[in-house]
Image: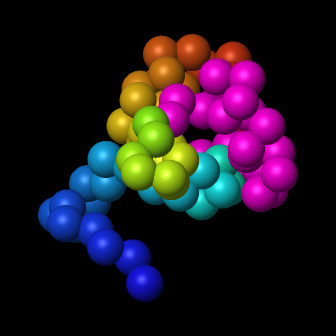
Amino acid sequence: MSRKSTTAGEAPFTESVPELGRRLLGLGRQSSYAAARRGEIPTIKIGGKLRGLTRVLEARLARDPQNNP
């Protein structure tokens, strides 16, 4: 169950690391976590959960067309 409090067409502030990696980079679960460890997927830890920062990664990809899948 997804808890998104954003309006239609607006990205959520955070997503699970695997979901963000899959959606924006075409990565699987393990590759997404590996990219997060390397700093390629920006993250924040909330409690015991690691969350991907959606808008930060989208902005990075928009700035650097070489990294777009």
Quadrant of image for the C terminus: top right
Magenta range is 24-43
The image shows residue 28 at horizontal and vertical percentages of 80, 56
Q: Is residue 65 above or below residue 29?
A: above
Count the marks: 0
**Is 19 positioned to the left or the right of 69 in the image?**
left
Residue drawn 65% across and 48% down?
21
- Asked if the magenta segment contains residue 61, the reply would be no
Q: Is residue 68 visible?
A: no
Question: Could you say where residue 10 lies in the image, as x and y percent from the top left?
Answer: 26, 54
Q: Which residue is found at the position 41% from the left and 51% from the top?
A: 47
Q: Residue at x 48, y 16 (%)?
A: 63
User: What secondary structure is the magenta-colored segment mainly?
Assistant: helix
Is 41 colored magenta in this rendering? yes
- Is residue 61 something that shows in the picture? yes
Residue 35, horizontal then vertical, whole percent: 73, 33
* Nearer to the camera, 39 or 68: 39
Q: Position of residue 58 (x, y in %)?
A: 45, 34
